[in-house]
């Protein structure tokens, strides 16, 4: 490590990244001072544990995110944008907001970003299931939890990259707005990148039913739009597609009857 008196790396000024290439080809590469991570995840196992990735999403990568018909353009576009974000990070502190109906792969893509950033760039990342966090915070008020509010919020406020998964899943309330506002405003003020997934469309989508703004309140909504580049994912529900494919793979009833002793 190249160090000056302050202890900061002279090559990257302490940011942990150096810029290679120029203009459109500019990319941020991890500085040599990051190459021997101390408290940072290095391998897949450490990443999954440190970032608290739920087991269902342990294998999610860009490489196994399929752009399948009839929505291959939207899926391909979303994958390219997500991959570019990971490639270019931290050239911009603007995060991503993946918006779309259930089962279209938003969480898959968001986890793929965390995986790429953690493993290839040594960036500390944290998965946060928003509904889960809110339930746990609520439990601290009801004294049903051994954890304090600070224990729960600290990783979400301070980790370099946080995924707020399934934002808007809970009915709006002043407490919800205050809690989300604290998280989003702290990250905004510290210029920390945030990745968001949500089922709720913003107003410009013009759909019926509650919008994202209705679910999270105008203050949080406005900050997030400034903090994140919006990516709409339009596709069929992959969970149903898998179910149908499994169903087609089942042996026919005669075959099944034949196998029964
Ligand atoms: N394009 C895809 N290629 C491969 N697997 C996919 C794709 N889209 C979704 N999946 C898989 O389908 C399952 C559901 O995807 P995911 O949970 O990412 O959907 P989601 O958009 O986050 O849904 P929700 O809004 O309900 O949270 C996951 O197991 C995911 O890995
Ligand atoms: Mg999801």
Image: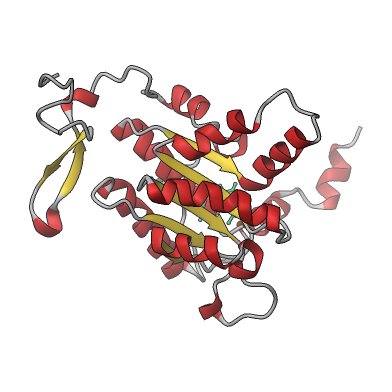
Residue 29 visible, this angle: yes
Look at the image and tell me in which quarter the C terminus lies: top right
| Residue 177: quadrant of the picture | bottom right
Q: Quick one: quadrant of the N terminus?
A: top left
Query: Hey, which quadrant is residue 260 in on the image?
Result: top right
Q: Where is residue 208, by image quadrant?
A: bottom right
Q: How is the image coloured?
A: secondary structure
In this view, 261 is above or below 82: above
Give percent across and percent down for residue 155: 51, 33
- Residue for point 49% across, 69% down: 71
Left of 91 or right of it: where is 230? right
Q: Residue at x 15, y 33 (%)?
A: 13
Q: Is residue 176 left or right of residue 22?
A: right
For the question of whether residue 228 can be seen, the reply is: no
Instruction: Using the image as rendered, state which of residue 139 and residue 197 is in the foreground.
Output: 139
Residue 225 sits above or below residue 43 on the image: below
Q: Give residue 259's position: percent from left, percent from top.
A: 84, 37
Q: Residue at x 11, y 44 (%)?
A: 20
Most extreme residue toward the right, as rendered?
A: 261
**Residue that extends furthest to the left in the rendered view of this protein:** 22
Q: How many marks?
A: 0
| 189 left or right, relative to 235 | left
Residue 45 is situated, as x and y percent measured from the top left of the image, at 47, 23
Q: 167 or 179: nearer the eye? A: 179
Say if 193 sits above or below 143 in the image.
Answer: below
Q: Is residue 61 above or below residue 23?
A: above
x, y (%) of residue 244?
A: 69, 57
């Amino acid at each position: 490590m190249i160090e000056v008196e302050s202890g900061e790396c002279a090559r990257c000024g302490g940011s942990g990244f150096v810029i290679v290439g120029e203009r459109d080809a500019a990319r941020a590469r991890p500085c040599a001072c990051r190459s021997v991570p101390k408290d940072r995840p290095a391998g897949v196992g450490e990443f999954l544990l440190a970032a608290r990735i739920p087991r269902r999403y342990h294998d999610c990568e860009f490489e196994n995110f399929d752009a399948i018909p009839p929505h291959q353009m939207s899926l391909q576009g979303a994958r390219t944008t997500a991959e570019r974000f990971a490639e270019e990070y931290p050239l911009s502190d603007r995060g991503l907001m993946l918006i779309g109906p259930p089962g279209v792969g938003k969480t898959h893509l968001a986890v793929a970003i965390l995986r790429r950033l953690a493993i290839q760039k040594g960036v500390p990342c944290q998965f946060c299931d928003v509904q889960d966090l809110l339930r746990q915070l609520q439990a601290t008020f009801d004294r049903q939890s051994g954890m304090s509010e600070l224990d729960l919020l600290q990783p979400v406020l301070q980790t370099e990259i946080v995924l707020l998964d399934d934002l808007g899943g809970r009915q709006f309330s002043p407490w919800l707005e205050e809690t989300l506002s604290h998280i989003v405003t702290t990250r905004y003020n510290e210029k920390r990148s945030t990745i968001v997934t949500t089922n709720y469309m913003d107003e410009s989508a013009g759909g019926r039913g509650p919008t994202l703004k209705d679910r999270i309140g105008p203050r949080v909504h406005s900050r997030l739009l400034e903090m994140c580049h919006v990516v709409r994912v339009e596709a069929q529900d992959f969970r149903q597609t898998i179910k149908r494919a499994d169903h087609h793979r089942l042996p026919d009833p005669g075959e099944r009857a034949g196998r029964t002793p």
